[in-house]
Structures are given as structure tokens and as C-alpha cells.
């Protein structure tokens, strides 16, 4: 699935602090990647008190989407197909591993909740199929429901999220060099993150998220 390419995230129940490592890693980090599935911007906020927030946003390549699923053809003519992932929780280090526990997670497509996007995609596929096959109007509703159910089974959100984070479930190896943070991407390569300055607006939103879990979930940059 397309989200496998965004395999930077790790999740693990955290046990105990690692003060010196956290002092050096605390801050806001950003990585830009251009891979087979599309171009993505990732931002990782590691707070000095152990709070963590990660966002990944990007535009999927229409060709890649169409190659991954027959359903891709239904959206290949869209002006853009954007995907965003937001996770918030806690972080720590264990040896040379950076460990994230992202309790709050959200996946969105074209700024819509993932489930809503799948329903819309099912409607578009059903309408296209009904027109091609001249299916009677009274049967379109049942056809739509059938296609939507099939899409939800094929593109289950929880399964995609599990696939997204499974490669780094035990934490990811890291190397800190000045304002660069190098993370093992889980596929034999390295992702390079650059330290950036967090804006006052972002800092305020992040403070709200920490004190009110579940709010501010749509902040991505």
C-alpha cells in the first residue's frame, strides 16, 4: 500500500527517561523526501519533557496510485491527491535507538478523514461502473455499498497505520550530528532530518495538544 513508503514512524511503550540523549535531540526536525509513491514533507517535534508529535504530508503520484490498486484509476484525473498523517504521544531513547509512542494518530486524504475518502471513492467507482454497464438507477445504491465495503476491506485504515509503523516497532537507530539527525529508514537506508525553528503559532498549537489530547490534530507543518 502507498503508505508503506512513509515508514519513518515507530511506536513502543516507553519505560524510563534518557536525559542526556533527550537534551540533544529535543527540538523540531524536518525531512523532505521524493520517493516512488510521491513527495513528502515530514516534521518531528521532540519536546524536552518527553512529548512527541510527528506529521507527514505530501502528494501521491497518480501513476503510483494507479499501479497499486485498480481503484487508483478513479482518482488519477484529480488535480492533486494529498495524504497527511499526524501522530502525537511521547518519546525517549534507549541506547542508540529513538523510540516513539504515538497514542494519537490520524490519517487524512485530500483533507478528508480516511474513511470518508474511501466512501467518496466508492461512490465515484460505482457511478463510473454504472454508466459503463448501463446499470438501472435503482440498483446503483446497492452497487455503491458493495464497492465501498470492498474498498474498506482492502484499504483498512488501522491495517495501513500498523503497516506504516511496523518496521520501527522497536525504535529506530539514530545518529545526531549538529543540526542533522540521521534515522535508519528500516529499508537499509538513512533519512536525514534537519533541525528547524518552530514558529510561535506551532508552539502554541503543540502546547494545546499536550494539555488537551485529541485537539489540534490537523496541524501538519
Image (cartoon, helix red, strand yellow):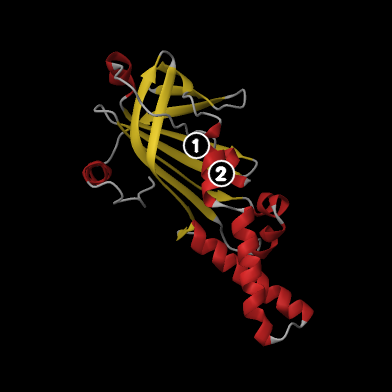
Give the quadrant of residue 71. Answer: bottom right
Q: Could you tell me residue 31's position as x and y percent?
A: 46, 34
- Is label 1 in a helix, a strand or a loop? strand
Mark 2 is surrounded, within 10 Å at the Cα level, by few (under 14), some (14 to 19) or many (20 or more) other residues, namely: some
State the quadrant of the C terminus.
top left
Query: Could you tell whether 50 is left or right of 182 in the image?
Result: left
Residue at the (56%, 45%) spot, across then down: 159
Query: Could you tell whether 79 is left or right of 47 in the image?
Result: right
Please say if the residues under marks 2 and 1 sit with CB atoms less than 8 Å apart: yes
Where 99 falls versus 52 (above or below)?
A: above
- Is label 2 in a helix, a strand or a loop? strand
Q: Residue 32: which numbered mark, if any?
A: 1
Q: Residue 57: which numbered mark, if any?
A: none
User: Label 2: which residue?
Assistant: 39
Residue at the (42%, 34%) spot, across then down: 30
Looking at the image, the residue that sits furthest to the right is: 133
Give the quadrant of residue 16. Answer: top left
Q: Measure the alpha-carbon separation of dots 2 and 1.
A: 8 Å
Q: Could you tell me residue 143's position as x and y percent?
A: 67, 74
Query: Could you tell whether 130 is left or right of 203 in the image?
Result: right
Q: Is residue 83 visible in this depiction of the protein?
A: yes
Amino acid at each position: 500500500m502507498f503508505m508503506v513508503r512513509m515508514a519513518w514512524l515507530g511506536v513502543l511503550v516507553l519505560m524510563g527517561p534518557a536525559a542526556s540523549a533527550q537534551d540533544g535531540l529535543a527540538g523540531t526536525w524536518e525531512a523532505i523526501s521524493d520517493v516512488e509513491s510521491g513527495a513528502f514533507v515530514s516534521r518531528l517535534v521532540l519536546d524536552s519533557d518527553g512529548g512527541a508529535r510527528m506529521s507527514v504530508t505530501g502528494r501521491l503520484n497518480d501513476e503510483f496510485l494507479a499501479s497499486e490498486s485498480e481503484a487508483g484509476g478513479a482518482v488519477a484525473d484529480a488535480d492533486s491527491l494529498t495524504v497527511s498523517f499526524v501522530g502525537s504521544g511521547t518519546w525517549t531513547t534507549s541506547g542508540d535507538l529513538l523510540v516513539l509512542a504515538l497514542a494519537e494518530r490520524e490519517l487524512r486524504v485530500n483533507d478528508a478523514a480516511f474513511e470518508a475518502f474511501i466512501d467518496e471513492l466508492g461512490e465515484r467507482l460505482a457511478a463510473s461502473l454504472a454508466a459503463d454497464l448501463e446499470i438501472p438507477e435503482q440498483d446503483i445504491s446497492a452497487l455503491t455499498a458493495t464497492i465501498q465495503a470492498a474498498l474498506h476491506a482492502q484499504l483498512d485504515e488501522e491495517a495501513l497505520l500498523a503497516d506504516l509503523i511496523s518496521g520501527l516497532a522497536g525504535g529506530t537507530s539514530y545518529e545526531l550530528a549538529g543540526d542533522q539527525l540521521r534515522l535508519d529508514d528500516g529499508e537499509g537506508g538513512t533519512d536525514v532530518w534537519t533541525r528547524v525553528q518552530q514558529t510561535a503559532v506551532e508552539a502554541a498549537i503543540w502546547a494545546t495538544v499536550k494539555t488537551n489530547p485529541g485537539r489540534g490534530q490537523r496541524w501538519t507543518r
